[in-house]
């Protein structure tokens, strides 16, 4: 009978010891069963002699005695625990809570297929999903400057994973809006569908610039143990701060269509160009002085400036359709604006090559 008690206890220990799940909730059943057996063994063990005497009177066959004891033990334990079972379960739930599942950042939150039959609701859902993309891109951009300046390899990897989430969300939004446009849309809905796709494309491009360009530059800086000069780091931070602030403006414009904020964002393009130009000229001046930090990070420094400016160009794209719709901006003027910016960039790039010997691209 003592061996029967040991067998009951041993069979309850194994599932607890061998449990491999990371979720504490998976331990509720084996731990609950173990407690049941421990209580039963502790109660029965001191009374084995009188129990054996009682069972011998029922059936003197020792084999039957052991079998009857095994059956009786489990029936008694079931009867004892069936009453307080609800309380017992609550206690186990409290001490072994279910692990909260981490949401997949790449999983669409708002693309409800049931809304596809109502284009206005579906477009609203798609807009919210693009904002979800925007939140991830904003987080990537915010952490980019930290990764560049702190040489944090783990942060670089985290940002690269976030770009994978942005890519998957972009594909989901693209497919969803394509389904919406299969139906005949009025002019306003059709225009909004194109705005959603356009902004999603630009957000995806921003994510790619951060991942494929800026994070590669961060990895190169870490590998070679380069350090920006204090002045250079401050200039990169200043430009990054302006770009990040304007991304927040762009997300607001995308949802509200506010003309005043759109004008403000577009005017920031001039400011960003001036900040980038000044930073590049200051860097070239430090090169002429022969500053060691500036010499070894010259290519990195100019490439970071270039990529932040490219990101800002994608950010500003959200303002164009808003101002075009109100007649504040003519398409031909936009082409003229971009041509002027490209020409100025070409002139400045040629000057940088002559002065610094580096390709700022």
Image (cartoon, helix red, strand yellow):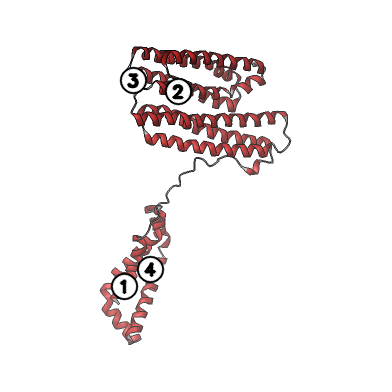
Tag 4, which secondary structure?
A: helix
Disc nearest the viewer among 1 and 2: 2
Is label 4 in contact with label 3 (beta carbons under 8 Å)? no
User: Mark 3 highlights which residue?
Assistant: 293
**Image spot of residue 311 (x, y percent):** 51, 25
Residue count near mark 1 (Cα–Cα under 10 Å), binned few <14, some 14–19, many ≥20: some
Quarter occupied by the N terminus? bottom left
Number of callouts? 4
Q: Earlier in the sequence, mark 1 or mark 4?
A: 1
Q: Is residue 168 visible?
A: yes
Nearer the camera: disc 1 or disc 4: 1
Q: Is residue 66 above or below residue 153?
A: below
Give the percent coordinates (x, y) of residue 224: 35, 29
Does residue 250 appear left or right of residue 293 in this picture? right
Q: CA distance from mark 3 to mark 1?
A: 75 Å
In the structure shown, which secondary structural element does the residue marked by tag 2 occupy?
Answer: helix
* Residue with the mark numbered 2: 303
Q: Residue at x 46, y 31 (%)?
A: 140
Query: Residue placed at 27% from the left, 72% from the top?
Result: 45
Residue 5 is marked as 1
Circle 4 residue:
80
Crowding at mark 3 (Cα within 10 Å: few <14, some 14-19, many 20+): some
């Amino acid at each position: 009978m003592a061996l029967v008690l040991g067998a009951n206890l041993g069979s309850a220990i194994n599932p607890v010891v061998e449990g491999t799940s990371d979720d504490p909730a998976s331990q509720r059943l084996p731990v609950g069963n173990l407690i049941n057996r421990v209580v039963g063994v502790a109660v029965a063990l001191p009374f084995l002699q009188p129990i054996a005497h009682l069972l011998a009177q029922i059936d003197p066959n020792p084999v039957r005695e052991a079998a009857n004891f095994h059956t009786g033990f489990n029936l008694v334990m079931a009867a004892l625990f069936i009453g307080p079972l609800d309380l017992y379960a609550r206690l186990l739930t409290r001490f072994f809570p279910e692990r909260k599942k981490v949401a997949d950042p790449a999983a669409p939150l708002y693309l409800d297929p049931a809304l596809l039959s109502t284009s206005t609701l579906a477009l609203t859902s798609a807009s919210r999903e693009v904002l979800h993309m925007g939140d991830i891109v904003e987080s990537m951009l915010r952490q980019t400057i930290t990764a560049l300046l702190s040489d944090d390899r783990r942060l670089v990897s985290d940002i690269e994973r976030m770009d994978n989430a942005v890519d998957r969300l972009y594909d989901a939004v693209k497919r969803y809006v394509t389904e919406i446009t299969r139906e005949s849309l009025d002019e306003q809905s059709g225009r909004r569908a194109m705005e959603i796709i356009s902004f999603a494309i630009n957000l995806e491009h921003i994510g790619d610039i951060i991942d494929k360009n800026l994070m590669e530059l961060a990895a190169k800086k870490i590998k070679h143990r380069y350090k920006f000069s204090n002045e250079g780091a401050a200039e990169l931070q200043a430009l990054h701060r302006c770009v990040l602030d304007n991304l927040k403006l762009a997300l607001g414009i995308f949802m509200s269509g506010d003309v005043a904020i759109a004008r403000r964002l577009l005017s920031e393009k001039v400011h960003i160009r001036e900040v980038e130009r000044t930073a590049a000229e200051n860097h070239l001046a430090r090169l002429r002085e022969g500053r060691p930090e500036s010499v070894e990070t010259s290519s990195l420094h100019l490439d970071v400036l270039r990529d932040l400016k490219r990101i800002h160009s994608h950010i500003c794209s959200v303002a164009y359709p808003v101002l075009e719709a109100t007649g504040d901006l003519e398409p031909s003027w936009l082409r003229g604006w971009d041509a002027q910016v490209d020409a100025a960039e070409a002139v400045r790039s040629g000057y940088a090559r002559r002065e610094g010997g580096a390709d700022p691209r």
